[in-house]
Amino acid sequence: MNLKNKKVFLTRPYKVVYRDGDRIVKVFTKEHGKANVFNEALCQARVEESGLNIPKVLEVSQIDGEWAISIEFIEGRTLEELMKENPAELEKYMEQFVDLQLTMHANKAPRLTLQKDKFARKISSLKDVIDATTRYELCTRLDSMPNHTKLCHGDFNPSNVIVAKDGTMSIVDWAHATQGNASGDAAITYLEFALKDQKTADLYLELFCKKSDTAKQYVQKWLPIAAAAQLTKGVEEEREFLMRWIDIIDFQ
């Protein structure tokens, strides 16, 4: 496959995403690792089995010595773009966003990794970032949370929602998908909003709790756990913000 004349959709430190006709092609750097690439493709394929309407994995291949995943292209714009262009419509878009998340949570993908196992691995990997006492307390809190098996995205934010011309919404980028607790998934979404704008984050949390009939305090109990998990991304600009969420834990 020759990608020299293909449109670059997205660049990240570990991948470049191209448009190639009716597909997008994610080309990963060697540093990302073969196992990570195959795991991402496997996660997406397992979500496909849930019956949720998402872009399908078409191929895993090598391009110029680097591993790549080809996925169906979904025509449309991201919900993030629409929110920025139409700030007066933010609440309407946020309602649709939360409704889509709850539709996702109503599905199951029983062969996905357990969310609590993934959170625990991430917390345990932070030896150079947070001390042993805090890691222990985070894992204790995680252990105490109810075990659920809902389909969770792990990075559900408006940039991962594609809106077609007819208004149909599709969720993309399933690399972090797990089966677990919807409120744990919501905690990650809340933090991603809060990193950019606290009022938008508060609107999201209010709508999520109202529509899912979930106590706000319950989602908030997940926030230190979610913050620790997000720390493993190693984004230096986010570190201070995430550490504040970990530091305010009230371990009773």
Image (cartoon, rainbow, N blue to C red):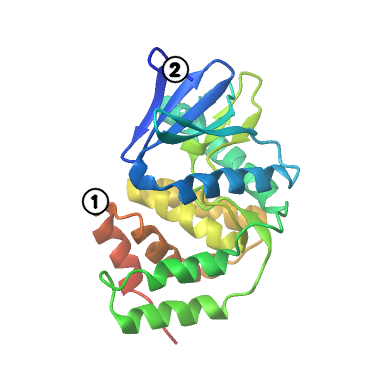
- Per the image, the residue denoted by label 1 is 237
Instruction: From this view, report whether residue 103 is shown above or below residue 136.
Output: above
Q: In the image, what residue occupies the spot 28% across and 51% down?
A: 235
Residue 66 x %, y %: 40, 35
Q: In the image, what residue occupies the spot 29% across and 66% down?
A: 244
Q: Is residue 96 left or right of residue 190?
A: right
- Per the image, the residue denoted by label 2 is 2
Amino acid under disc 1: Glu
Quadrant where the C terminus sits is bottom left
**Residue 141 in view here:** yes
**Residue 98 in view here:** no
Amino acid under disc 2: Asn
Q: Is residue 241 left or right of residue 178?
A: left
Of callouts 1 and 2, the N-terminal one: 2
Residue 209 x %, y %: 59, 58
Element class at badge 1: helix
Outermost residue toward the front?
65
Question: Residue 121 bears which disc, if any?
Answer: none
Outermost residue toward the bottom?
252
Q: Nearer the viewer, residue 1 or 100?
A: 1
Element class at badge 2: loop
Q: How many marks?
A: 2
